[in-house]
Image (cartoon, helix red, strand yellow):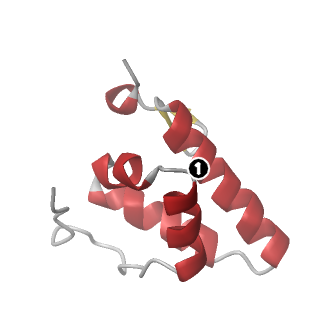
């Protein structure tokens, strides 16, 4: 599935290698790719905007946990991503 980023109004953030590695390591790349383009982009921007490395790692862990659990986006209920 190819994600359409053409409708994004915010700048598009590239995926850092450490995020790609974490997604691949936890087997969550497919779950990440299933999310809408704005969510993929928001997660990356949110992680990258952190000033401290510890904060980047904390945000990355939250993203990974939300993708693994499903049904959550940025600590909010997200019904369309709930796992069956």
Viewer-closest of 19 and 8 = 19
Q: Residue 19 lies in what quarter of the image?
A: bottom right
Q: Residue at x 61, y 39 (%)?
A: 75
The number of callouts visible is 1
Element under label 1? Answer: helix
Q: Residue at x 37, y 81 (%)?
A: 11
Which percent across, then down, holds residue 39? Answer: 39, 55
Q: Residue at x 49, y 61 (%)?
A: 24
Which percent across, then down, holds residue 77? Answer: 50, 28
Which percent across, then down, holds residue 83? Answer: 40, 24
Viewer-closest of 5 and 17 = 17
Q: Is residue 21 shown left or right of residue 30?
A: right
State the quadrant of the N terminus: bottom left
User: Disc 1 designates what residue?
Assistant: 64
Residue 22's place in the image compared with 50, above or below, is: above
State the quadrant of the C terminus: top left
Q: Residues within 10 Å of mark 1 (few under 14, many from 20)?
A: many
Which percent across, then down, holds residue 49? Answer: 63, 77
Q: Is residue 11 shown left or right of residue 47?
A: left
Q: Is residue 32 shown left or right of residue 57?
A: left
Q: Residue at x 66, y 49 (%)?
A: 62
Residue 19's place in the image compared with 80, above or below, is: below
């Amino acid at each position: 599935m190819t994600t359409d980023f053409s409708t994004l109004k915010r700048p598009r953030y590239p995926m850092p290698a450490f995020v790609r590695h974490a997604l691949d390591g936890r087997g969550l790349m497919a779950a990440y790719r299933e999310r809408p383009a704005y969510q993929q982009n928001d997660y990356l921007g949110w992680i990258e905007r952190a000033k401290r490395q510890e904060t980047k790692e904390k945000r990355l862990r939250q993203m990974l946990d939300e993708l693994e659990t499903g049904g959550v986006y940025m600590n909010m209920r997200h019904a369309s991503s709930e796992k069956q």
